[in-house]
Amino acid sequence: MDTSVKKKFSTYPADIFISLNTVRDLIFSVAMQDGITDITETLKWGEPSYVSKIGSTIRIDWKDKYPEQFCIYFNCKTSLIETFKEIYGDTFTYEGNRAIVLKRNQVIPYKELAHCLSMSLRYKQIKHLVLLGA
């Protein structure tokens, strides 16, 4: 884990640490499954961020201002959230066109989230496809 990201993760409450680390692990697992080997992990705007050369940045974070949720952020200038809404509807709660919002004690819908993460990690290759090739 990147040192700055590790330091950021250490600031989260224990249950949020586990949830965000699970999402982090899922990002790397999806990347491996998709044959993406160039994932960069860093802090962007103070949030753990993940990007591949063929994709769009994914950020994850919990904020004490909204203690009962954590978010997975996507570039709002892409069609990612719009596509997720079309495919998965109310499987997720969304924050505008920039984030998937998960509740603190919510069971993470792994299969659906993995698909969303995959689309983001491959975005530059699939952005021209209807529903991002879903």
Image (cartoon, rainbow, N blue to C red):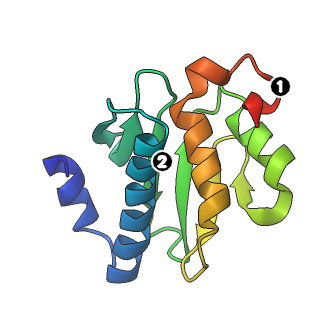
User: Which amino acid is tagged 2?
Assistant: Val
The amino acid type of the residue labelled 1 equals Val
Relative side of 79 to 17, left or right:
right
Instruction: Identify the residue at the far left of this view.
Output: 3
Label 1 environment density (alpha carbons within 10 Å; few <14, some 14–19, many ≥20): few
**x and y, in percent, of residue 2 in the image:** 18, 47
Q: Is residue 112 above or below residue 52?
A: below
Residue 53 vertical position relative to residue 40 in the rendered view, above or below: above
Q: In the figure, residue 61 lies in which quadrant? A: bottom left
Q: Which residue is mark 2?
A: 30
The residue lying toward the viewer, choosing from 68 and 52, is 52
Judging depth in this view, the residue of 134 and 82 nearest the camera is 134
Check residue 60 in the rendering and tell me which mark sits there, or answer none: none
Residue 100 falls left or right of residue 27: right
Residue shown at 75%/46% (left/top)?
Answer: 84
Which of the two labelled residues, at mark 2 and mark 1, occupies the earlier sequence position? Answer: 2
Question: Tag 1, which secondary structure?
Answer: helix
Which residue occupies 34% across, 72% down? 17
Q: Quadrant of residue 80?
A: top right
- Could you tell me which secondary element the residue under label 2 belongs to? helix
Q: Quadrant of the C terminus?
A: top right
How far across and down, in percent of the image, does residue 4 sit? 18, 48
Q: Taking 59 as reference, is 7 above or below it? A: below
Is 121 displayed left or right of 18 in the figure?
A: right
As measured in the structure, the alpha-carbon distance from the residue carrying label 2 to the one carrying label 1 is 21 Å
Judge whether 47 appears above or below 123 on screen. Answer: below
Q: Report which residue position mark 1 lands on.
A: 130
